[in-house]
Image (cartoon, rainbow, N blue to C red):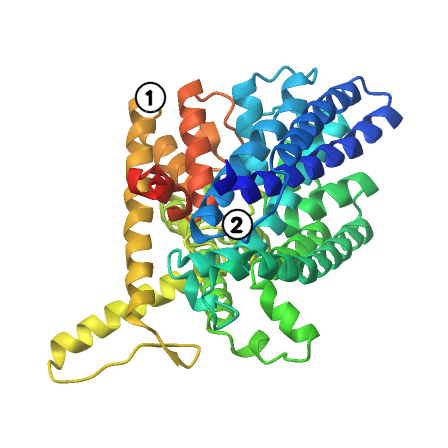
């Protein structure tokens, strides 16, 4: 117990914050005279009780986090928060089982955007607000973790983005606290700007607030079953595209820009790679659609820009059924599901920098085969790439696709058809949300899946959001030995 006293204390504080957060939709429901406000009060009391219990249990001298404790904190905090965040959904009158509630909460906190709920237009506003808040909290949480914790833990090449030269694990907690404060201000400011832009574009105040939360977190939860296609507004889609892109860039460059260093905004390899990839895919799909389908160039461009940006950033909004764009488009968008945005953003997926490192490694391998006596140094952002980083990225990529294959096989064993199993596994581990096909495509949701499949996808969402190894390392017996 003493070894994990700091971990329990931090989780207790997180649960306390979650309990306070539950009061916001409770007040919203009370003013809307919706009976579901009571489920949030009850859930807040239960969550608050366990929060106080954990804080009191861990009272005493709190020592700085070790690397082992940081791993434990990363995994168990997400699981614990999800378990309690599911309570209001389970207690509400919309009739969700605890499995469905846990799935919805996991999808929210991991900013996946896969939903169980049908009839969102008639769903009580406090439930819609809670879903949006979960994604917003998850978005800021993953940014702080990606910038301050994962680089210290050397997870999947994230050490490339270490912000300080010291590897001293005792600096993890204070460093995370310092960065969280600065990033949270930027995150809140961008969220407010996004909500204001949605309001100007024609959304109601409630829709503007909830969609701003789910846009900035690249989560994708909406207030309608038809997602942003419900509004059929070019202005609203334009706002969404702009802020989805903003949220998929490293938030640390915004912090640097505020401090006077704006150069990374224009020179960072990740940013240039992400934007180049986005433009290339949009151009390719646009040309494909106007050359092979009976659709106007303007309509095709509008639909391709929005849906491609949504899938590449991992947001998961939809304005049209991209499953009807043809086999080439489906295959290309399926690949897009895996890539994601930049490290240090709210976006998910494999991350652009890993794709770049894999391609650089492939290029060097070909050069070494062609010129055995040559010396080829891989660089990233002008700096030489250490072999340890390259090895971490290649291992991560191999593990990523191996787990994707295993998850797809398990889903297939549980009765899902091939397209649904493959796209669900991809959407889960890449934290995108909607998959392909009639069942979980942009016009469907995950409510029809078997119970076992929902739990498998919860694990997939957790693995994908926490960068795989943060969870996998805790499954090894050696990790728990002193």
List x then y, in percent, for residue 105: 58, 31
Residue at the (30%, 48%) spot, across then down: 399
Look at mark 2 in the image and give the residue it sits on.
Answer: 295
Q: For numbered disc 2, what is the local secondary structure?
A: loop
Residue indicated by mark 1 = 414
The numbered mark, 2 or 1, whose residue comes first in the sequence reads 2
* Res 425 → quadrant: top left
Determine the residue positioned at 37% across, 47% down. Answer: 469
Residue 128 pos. (x, y %): 70, 32
Q: Nearer the viewer, residue 60 or 236?
A: 60
| Neighbourhood count class around disc 2 (C-alpha, 10 Å): few under 14, some 14–19, many 20 upward | few
Answer left or right for 421 relative to 121.
left
Q: In percent of the image, x 63 and y 42: which residue is there? A: 60
Which of discs 2 and 1 lies nearer the camera? The answer is: 1
Image quadrant in which the C terminus is located: top left
In this rendering, would 347 be left or right of 284?
Answer: right
Name the residue located 25 percent from the left edge and 72 percent from the top edge. 363
Residue 167 to residue 411: above or below? below
Q: Is residue 86 left or right of residue 103?
A: right
| Mark 1, secondary structure of its residue | loop
Quadrant of the image occupied by residue 134? top right
* Separation of residues labelled 2 and 1 (CA atoms): 38 Å
Asked whether residue 322 is in view, the answer is: no
Mark 1 surroundings within 10 Å by alpha-carbon count, few (fewer than 14), some (14 through 19), many (20 or more)? some
Viewer-nearest residue: 173 or 467: 173
Contact (CB < 8 A) between labels 2 and 1? Answer: no
Observer able to see residue 160: yes
Question: Residue 352 at x, y = what percent?
Answer: 43, 61
């Amino acid at each position: 117990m003493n070894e994990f006293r700091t971990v329990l204390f931090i989780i207790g504080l997180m649960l306390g914050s979650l309990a306070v957060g539950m009061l916001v939709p409770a007040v919203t429901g009370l003013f809307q005279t919706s009976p579901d406000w009571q489920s949030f009060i009850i859930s807040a009391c239960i969550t608050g009780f366990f929060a106080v219990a954990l804080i009191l249990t861990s009272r005493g001298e709190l020592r700085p986090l070790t690397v082992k404790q940081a791993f434990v904190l990363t995994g168990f905090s997400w699981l614990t928060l999800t378990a309690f965040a599911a309570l209001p959904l389970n207690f509400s009158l919309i009739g969700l089982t605890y499995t469905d509630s846990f799935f919805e909460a996991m999808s929210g906190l991991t900013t996946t955007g896969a939903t169980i709920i049908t009839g969102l237009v008639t769903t009580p506003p406090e439930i819609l607000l809670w879903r949006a808040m979960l994604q917003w909290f998850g978005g800021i949480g993953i940014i702080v973790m990606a910038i301050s914790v994962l680089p210290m833990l050397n997870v999947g090449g994230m050490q490339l983005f270490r912000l300080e030269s010291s590897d001293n694990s005792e600096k993890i907690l204070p460093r995370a606290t310092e960065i969280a404060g600065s990033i949270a201000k930027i995150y809140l400011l961008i969220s407010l700007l996004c909500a204001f832009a949605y309001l100007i574009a024609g959304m109601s105040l409630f829709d503007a607030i909830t969609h701003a939360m789910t846009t900035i977190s690249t989560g994708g939860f909406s207030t309608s079953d038809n997602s942003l296609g419900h509004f059929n507004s070019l202005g609203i889609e334009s706002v969404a595209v702009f802020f989805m892109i903003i949220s998929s860039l490293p938030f640390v460059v915004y912090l640097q820009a505020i401090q006077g260093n704006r150069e990374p905004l224009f020179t960072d390899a990740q940013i240039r790679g992400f934007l180049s990839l986005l433009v290339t895919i949009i151009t390719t799909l646009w040309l494909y659609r106007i050359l092979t389908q009976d659709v106007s160039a303007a309509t095709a461009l509008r639909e391709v820009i929005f849906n491609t940006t949504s899938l590449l950033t991992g947001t998961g909004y939809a304005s049209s059924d991209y499953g009807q764009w043809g086999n080439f488009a489906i295959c290309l968008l399926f690949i897009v599901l895996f890539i994601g945005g930049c490290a240090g953003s709210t976006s998910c997926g494999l991350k652009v920098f890993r794709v770049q490192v894999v391609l650089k490694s492939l290029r060097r391998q070909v050069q070494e085969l062609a010129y055995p006596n040559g010396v080829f140094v891989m660089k990233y952002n002008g700096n030489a790439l250490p072999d340890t980083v390259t090895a971490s990225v290649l291992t991560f990529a191999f593990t990523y696709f191996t787990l994707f294959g295993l998850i797809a096989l398990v889903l297939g064993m549980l009765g899902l058809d091939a397209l649904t199993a493959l796209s669900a596994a991809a959407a889960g581990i890449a934290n995108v949300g909607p998959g392909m096909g009639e069942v979980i495509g942009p016009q469907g949701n995950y409510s029809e899946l078997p119970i076992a499949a929902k739990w498998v996808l919860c694990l997939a969402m957790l693995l994908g959001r926490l960068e795989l190894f943060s969870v996998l390392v805790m499954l090894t017996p050696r990790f728990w030995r002193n």
